[in-house]
Amino acid sequence: MTTLSKDPSKCFYVTICPDISYAKYGSYGINWKLSLIPVIRNWKSVCYGNGMFVAVAQSSNIAAYITEEDLAAGKPWSQSGYLINSNSQIWFSVCYGNGMFVAVASGSIATYITEEDLAAGNSWTQSSLPDSRSCRHDAASQTARHLM
């Protein structure tokens, strides 16, 4: 579960669930509603950054995103450009910092995208972690604030 909003009247809490095509959100964690995500996936992580929520899924090459304005209006999430050109990655976590979203997967795979590229539908840029041993990765940023 993740939350953060510039506008206190829109203090959204968002949670994603595996193997369904919607997220749940509530203002101040009450009055929960459903928000459609474009595809059914095993959604693993969601984060907030500068007015946008982003989610990544296990064994997938896509991410989903929604602005807090669209969430408040009851609009559905959008599918982002490809994380990488593979459906076999196990994505564990996504976070936001300094205008970029970063997602990490099993092994030594990481990807990143700027806010502008995400909104434009561009694909994520692949990078590598320094160690290829498979372990459970979590992404964090010193500018991000998360609630679990």
Image (cartoon, helix red, strand yellow):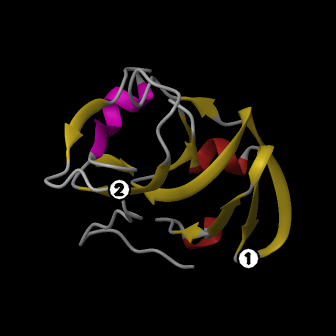
Q: Is residue 75 visible?
A: no
The answer to whether 77 appears left or right of 58 in the picture is right
- Residue at (43, 29) in percent of width and height: 119
The answer to whether 27 appears left or right of 132 in the picture is right
71 versus 36 height, above or below: below
- Residue at (65, 41) in percent of width and height: 70
Q: Is residue 54 visible?
A: yes
Q: Position of residue 98 (x, y in %)?
A: 21, 54
77 versus 33 height, above or below: above
Q: CA distance from mark 1 to mark 2?
A: 35 Å
31 versus 100 height, above or below: below
- Judge the density around disc 1: few (<14), some (14-19), many (≥20) Cα neighbours within 10 Å: few
118 versus 56 height, above or below: above
- Judge the density around disc 2: few (<14), some (14-19), many (≥20) Cα neighbours within 10 Å: few
> Which residues are drawn in magenta?
109-119
Residue at the spot of label 2: 134
Q: Nearer the viewer, residue 7 or 44?
A: 44
Q: Nearer the viewer, residue 79 or 67?
A: 79
Query: Which quadrant would residue 144 be assigned to in this image?
Result: bottom left
Q: Position of residue 49 (x, y in %)?
A: 40, 55
Inspect the image, locate mark 1, and give the three-letter code of the amino acid beneath it. Answer: Gly
Q: Position of residue 120 (x, y in %)?
A: 40, 21
Inspect the image, locate mark 2, and give the three-letter code of the amino acid beneath it. Answer: Ser
Q: Position of residue 11 (x, y in %)?
A: 61, 70
Q: Report the quarter where the C terminus lies.
A: bottom right
Q: Is 58 inside the magenta-drawn segment?
A: no
Toward the left, the furthest residue is: 130
**In the structure shown, which secondary structural element does the residue marked by tag 2 occupy?**
loop
Sequence-first disc among 1 and 2: 1
Q: Nearer the viewer, residue 13 or 135?
A: 135
The answer to whether 143 appears left or right of 47 in the picture is left
Residue at the spot of label 1: 29
